[in-house]
Image (tube, helix red, strand yellow):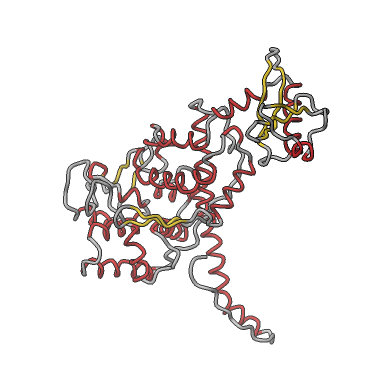
Amino acid sequence: MPKISKRVVDAAAPTDRRFYVWDDQIKGFGLLVLPTGVKSYIFQYRTPEARERRATIGKHGSLTAEEARDKADEMRGAVKAGRDPLDEKQQRRKAATVNDVLDIYLESEAFKAKAVGTRATDKGRINRHLKPLLGKLHVDALRPGDLSKAYASIRDGKTAIREKMGKRGLARVRGGEGAARKSLRLLRSTFAWAVTEKLIGSNPAKDFKTSVDGVREVILDDAAAYGRLFKTLDVMDAEKRVRQPVADAIRVIALTGARRGEVAGLKWTHVNLKTGMLTLPPASHKTGGKTGKPRIIGLPTAAQALIARQPAGDPDDFVFSPAKGEGPVVLSKIWNKVRVEAKLPDRIGLHGLRHSLASHMAMAGAQASEIMTALGHRDLATSQKYVHWAEDARQAIAEKGASVALAGLASSKGEPKADVVPLKGGAL
């Protein structure tokens, strides 16, 4: 028996019957030659129960003789360890893929219990980022390198697409650092849920680290910016370029710091204008699924007036009525037009109005616990970031204010006059 090599494989000419060429170094490693000329590498062995089994390693052409030899050697090691390589291969085919777990999750009660806006966002991350990159991989074979590669692909925009949604809709999937971070967090939490449901044995993303969310730098940094926003909404509303319910919903977000989904999905049953409070049940806000608690939003007088002028409806009707259909009002489409016309920062989104309110609360001296209550954060650490940001911002403002005095101090001592360099405006 020869050592199976490329020369031996090439020389094995087909006959009218199948035949085998066995390797003289690895017992059970062989080459199967069919009358059709197809040549396949195989490994024959006995299980711990003394059953004789024959596993196909792969066809010649898709594998070289040396690659097949390495795989046969791995199988031989598995057999010596008391395992059955063929049975393991068959079990692998039956094992849950990432797609399997994600599909089951999307139909689960845990997913359905999330707020409407959160479900839409999570579904987008699953279908547009996670499934294309990781869906076909088996969960129990997922490695840290697979997760890191997926993270980098989302971050670098490799999953970015423009997807048509219905007759007029268009979804722009851009990717980026934030999308990558949140997509992998979603995958990690989904696997954790799958473990509790006994769909998988362990969470392969449990120890995968993502960067930490920070306070977004792009905010409305002064009263003038808010003035431009509200004036633009007034003009567009008066000229019928935006529906009043849409304009009012944006106004309420700016005044309360509520999340876009919380305002868009607001129903009359959540509203109590006598107390000036909104009470969102756990299923209607982002952190409700984890805390099991309702979210209470206090309404300033101006926000109360905006809600009060909406046409009254049944308890389950939306406060800000959609143009058509049964879903909540759509705010994102008009926002970019409002932002451009109001000359607001390029990268500020509707969520930036929420960050703006929290940032200005911190600058005004609000404590983390007060910001936590106002914005409905799940933990104090999230709110504390705004306090730290405000402290840094105050230091920068103090330095800016003192620069003129410092220049005078230097000149009084006969030192060369220092140039006063203004700091850049915008968020600190």
> In the rendering, at what x and y percent does residue 301 appear?
27, 56
State left or right for residue 367 relative to residue 418. left
> In the rendering, at what x and y percent does residue 241 appear?
24, 66
Q: Identify which residue, 85 or 214, lies in the foreground.
A: 85
Answer above or below: position of 221 versus 417: above
State left or right for residue 71 relative to residue 36. right
Q: Residue furthest front?
A: 16
Q: Identify which residue, 125 or 378, lies in the foreground.
A: 125
Answer above or below: position of 299 versus 110: below
Residue 31 lies in quadrant: top right
x 41%, y 60%: residue: 349
Q: Identify which residue, 256 or 94, lies in the foreground.
A: 94
Q: Residue furthest top?
A: 49
> In the rendering, at what x and y percent does residue 168 appear?
30, 58
Q: How many marks?
A: 0
> In the rendering, at what x and y percent does residue 152 appear?
59, 52
Answer above or below: position of 13 versus 422: above
Answer above or below: position of 308 versus 61: below
State left or right for residue 413 relative to residue 363. right
x 28%, y 66%: residue: 233
State left or right for residue 14 relative to residue 181. right
For the N terminus, give its image quadrant: top right
